[in-house]
Amino acid sequence: MWLWGAMCADGQVPAGAFHGSTTVVRLAALTGASSLDGRLEELRGRAVLIATKDQLTAALALIELDGVARRIVLCPPDLAAAYFPGVIETAGADAWVRDDAVPEENGAGLGVEVKAQPALVATSVKRQRSHETEWILLTSGTTGAPKLVLHTLGTLTSVILYQRARQPAASNAPVWSTFYDIRRYGGLQIFLRAALRGGSLVLSDPKESITDFLARASAAGITHISGTPSHWRRALMSGAAATIAPTYVRLSGEIADQAILDNLKLAYPGTGVAHAFASTEAGVAFEVGDGLAGFPATLVGAAGGPVELKVADGTLQIRSGGNALRYLGEQFAPIRGADGFVDTGDRVDLRVGRYHFMGRAGGVINVGGLKVHPEEVEAVINAIPWVRMSLVKARRNPITGAVVTAEVVLADETDVAGERPQGAELTREIIEACRRGLPAHKVPAMVRIVPSLEVSAAGKLVRPSA
Amino acid sequence: MSVRATIVSQFEVVAGEQQRRLAPLTDDLKLLQSGLDSLSFAIIVARLEDELGFDPFNAEEAVEFPVTFGDFVRLYENSAG
């Protein structure tokens, strides 16, 4: 299977349109036009980095390059310049597609550079499949450097195709939208749904206010829309949620608590509100539409569907055709266990016939859909000369699901050269140090100075299990 | 310090930390036009819980999300009883 081929199934050109914040592209136009500066064939057989700020540009490049490139690497729009060389090397990239907003230096060493744009330019283009393209997604690692996760179009679409084969096509093609960026797994699923089910897609733009985005989505007639619980809370806080009248509202990427599900039911009466679980490594696990937090225990161990779930050591594990194949780079363990299941690292707890999500094993913190590894923040805090050790934890939060907090043990004054700040100045300095070294969502919201931290017999910090 | 004054002070502190320009905090100010982002609100709510001893969002019943600064203050004042 290849994307353009699947979009043109039954000899039809795709009927939908993709909406960027400034441009609308009718997909049918791709039969005689390209966003790739007339240079598609130069990218055939190559490992191509797609590094654009603009989402529509990336979406068009994905449609044009699947089946053409040997490998495509989806760089999220906020990928720091410092990580480019590592990503290029690990992915074996030899070409890239960028837009004006991404600096040329980021692609140093790449042989072929194609400047792409969100508009199509008429050109004679032969859409022909020559490669089973590998799709590389980036996910955050413990050290802050991204991990590269290998998928194919087949793994990314296994659940979508399963559903497509079983649900009749809607009489009116859906108009999808997502608050997510399509370079992340949750957003990519929506992009692929829209592309493969004959729909349209309204893409968000970080430069646009939520009110403007919802107005644009409404004007495009959106029927289906997805985002994280944090995105949805923000939409509700904007007072503009009622601008849209979707038939289907989807949450994923964070724990959907009962409050946000109830709030969305109130905001969109009569609309299906579903929450889904998926991860870059494990793929899509399920979608629950009964309006209740958590998921029915009957899903675990159920056979016959496209996805098998089990709970082992308190975490949710998934085996399906949607699992990623492996990480690129030799230092990583296999994604799948010996029995073929992928451990999501998400802890679940069984209560009265329903599993509820309890946060991440290994302490990974999810701040508004963005992962934070405590060790990475601790490393920055521990580098302050007058800090002995620190423990970074999640604290539940009604706006972003969680925020980062830190407990810090100070070094003995006699051990430290120079002066140690006092009182409130101490915690302010620690937060400032984090702000200099880390993106905003990783900076502790609060810092507490504690006399000591518990260390296990094995000499490791005792981390909270909740 | 009153609930309102505590809230105003947290808005100002967090705006300073996040290097965001805070709009004048009038009751009809839309929260999303206050200059703060979601992360800023998350930090404000967490710190207010420490200062005031409660989190009105974490109630049994779904609370209506505040849209204006006035809604936000009332949500806290009502929860304070």
Image (cartoon, coloured by chain):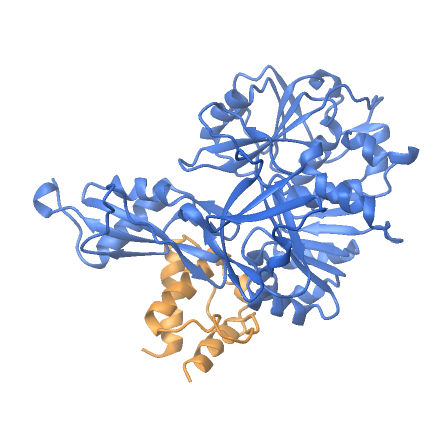
Figure label count: 0
* Residue A48, placed above or below residue A432: above
Residue A273 sits in quarter:
bottom right
* Residue A355, placed above or below residue A343: below
User: Does residue A445 show up?
Assistant: yes
The quadrant of the rendering that contains the N terminus of chain A is top right
User: Does residue A364 show up?
Assistant: no
Q: Along the horizontal axis of the image, is A32 left or right of B49?
A: right
Residue A44 spot, x, y in % from top left: 72, 18
Identity of the residue furthest to the right in this view: A11
Q: Which chain is orange?
A: B
Q: Along the horizontal axis of the image, is A383 left or right of A344?
A: left
* Residue A135, placed above or below residue A267: above
Q: Along the horizontal axis of the image, is A170 left or right of A448?
A: right
Residue A89 spot, x, y in % from top left: 51, 20
Residue A373 spot, x, y in % from top left: 41, 43
The picture's colour for chain A is blue
Identified at 72% across, 28% down, the residue is A66
